[in-house]
Image (tube, rainbow, N blue to C red):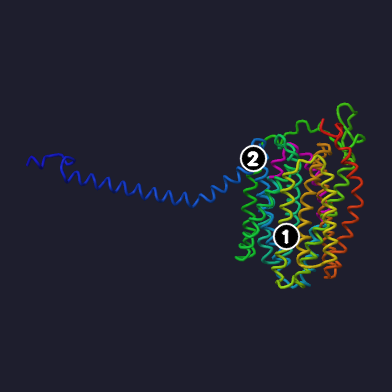
Amino acid sequence: MAAARTPQGATGTGGTKGFKGRSRTGGSGRVGGSVRAVGRALHLPFTGTARGIRRATHAHGAGESGLGKLIELHAVNGAGDVMITVALASTVFFSVPTDEARGRVALYLAITMAPFTILAPVIGPLLDRLPHGRRAAMAGAMFARALLALVLSGAVVTGSIELYPAALGVLVSSKAYGVVRSAVVPRLLPPRFSLVKANSRVTLGGLLATAVAAPVGAGLQMAGPRWPLYGAFVIFIAGTALSFSLPAKVDSAKGEDTALLAADEEHLHGPHRQPVKRPGLRTVGIAVTHALGANAALRWLSGFLTFFLAFLLREHPMTGQSAAVSLGMVAVSAGLGNALGTSVGAWLRSRAPELIIVTVLAFVLCMAITAAVFFGAVVVAGLAAVAGFSQALSKLSLDALIQRDVPEVVRTSAFARSETMLQVSWVFGGAVGIAMPLNGALGLSVAACVLAVGWLTTVRGLIGSARHSGSPRSRVT
C-alpha cells in the first residue's frame, strides 16, 4: 500500500514514462533539426547567390554611394526586356517562313519606329522638368511595361493589332528608363570611379541578367507564348518597387544649374563667365557630336548584322550546321563580345574616351573588311563578337562624354536625343539588312563602306577633342 502511495516520478514506472516523454521530445528535435538542415541546403544556392551578387554590385564603394542599387535595378530591367523580346521574336520572326518573316519584321519596324522617332525627342525635355521625380519616373517606366506585358500576352496569341501599339509603348518606356538611368549615374558615382567604369558596371549587370533570363524566357516560351510575358510582368513589378529603394539624392536637383561642363574653351560656362539663360544642346562642343556620329555608325552596323545575318543564315546556314545553330553561334559571339567590351570599360580609367571610340571603330572596320573578303563561319562569328565589343565600349565612352561635357540642366535631353539618333540608326541599318540580297560578301562590303564613312568623318574631330580634354578649363569646376 505504501508503495502505491509513492509519487509516480519516484517509481520505475514513472521514470520509464518520463524517459519515454524525453525520447519523444529528443526525436522531434532531431527531426526538426534535419528538416531545418534540408531547408538550409535547399535555399543555400539562392541565398548564397543573392549574397554573392550583392557583394559584387556593392563593391568598391558602390553600396555606400547607391550605385549598387542602380546596378541591381538595371539587371531587373534587362531581364524583363529580354522576356518581352523572346515573346515578340517568336511571334514575328521564327513562326513563319523566311519571305513572310522579312515582310512582317519590316512592318513591325515601320509601325513601331515611325511613331517612336516623333515621341522620343519629347522624352528628354519632359524628364528635364522632373529633377525631383527621377525615382518615380523610373518606377513609372517599369510599371508601364508590366501592364503592357499583360496586353501583349493576349495579342501574341490572337495576333490582334494591339501588338504594335503595345510594343511601341514598351519601346518608349524602355528608352525613358534608359535616359533617366544615364542621367542618374553621375549622382551615384563612388569615390575614385570614372564615369566609363560606373557606366560599364551598370551595363554589365544588365548583360548578366539578360544572359540568365534569356534561356528562362525560351523555356517559358515552350510552355506557351504568353508565359514569357507573364514572367516580364512579375519582373517589372519587382523593378517598380526597387526603383524607390534608390537613394534620395537621385531626386535632388542641388547644384544642377551650376555644374556646367564643356569640351572646349569656346563653349565653357562657369562662375567666371557670363551664364546663359538656358544652356542648349548646341553648347556641348565637338567631342559629343563626333562621338555620337561614330556611335551611330556602330549602331547602324548592329541593326544591319542583326537582320541581314538572321535572314542569311536561315537560308544559308554555316557549313555543317543547322539554321538554328548558326544563328545561335552568331548571337552568342555578339553577346560575349558585348560583355567583354563592357568588362573592359569597367577596368579602364582613361580620361580620353574620344580615343577609345576612334580605336574601336577602326578595329571593327578592319574586321568588317576581313569578313567581306574571307566570308565564312569563323570570320562572321568573329565580326559579330568584334561588333558587340566595339558597340559596348563606344557607347560607354559616349555616355561618359555626355556626362562630362553637357550642361546638367539639359543632360537628360542630350541622353534622350542621342538615344533617339542611335535607335533610328539601328532601325535604318536593320532596314538595309532586310532589303539586301542574301549574299554574304556583298552585304558585308556595304557594311564596311558605311563604317569607313563614319570613321573618316569623326576621327579628326575626336582626336582634336582628346588633345584639348586635358586642359583644366575643360574639367569640372
x 78%, y 31%: residue: 255
**Quadrant of the image occupied by residue 185:** top right
The quarter of the rendered structure image containing the N terminus is top left
Please give the residue where the numbered disc 1 appears in the rendered image: 333
x 89%, y 56%: residue: 452
> Is residue 28 positioned above or below 62 on the image?
below
Please give the residue where the numbered disc 2 appears in the rendered image: 59
Question: Quick one: which residue is furthest to the top in this view?
Answer: 272
Judge by depth and name the residue closer to the eye, 45 or 239: 45
Q: Residues within 10 Å of mark 1 (few under 14, many from 20)?
A: many
Q: Is residue 120 in the magenta section?
A: yes
Horizontal relation, residue 279 to residue 314: left or right: right
x 62%, y 66%: residue: 222
Q: Secondary structure at mark 1?
A: helix
Horizontal relation, residue 191 to residue 270: left or right: left
Q: Is residue 250 visible?
A: no
> Is residue 387 positioned above or below 14 on the image?
below
Separation of marks 2 and 1 at Cα, in angstroms: 28 Å
**Quadrant of the image occupied by residue 386:** bottom right
Amino acid beneath label 1: Ser
> Is residue 218 positioned above or below 357 on the image?
below
Q: Position of residue 287 (x, y in %)?
A: 87, 43
The boundaries of the magenta stretch are 115-138
> Is residue 160 positioned above or below 196 on the image?
below
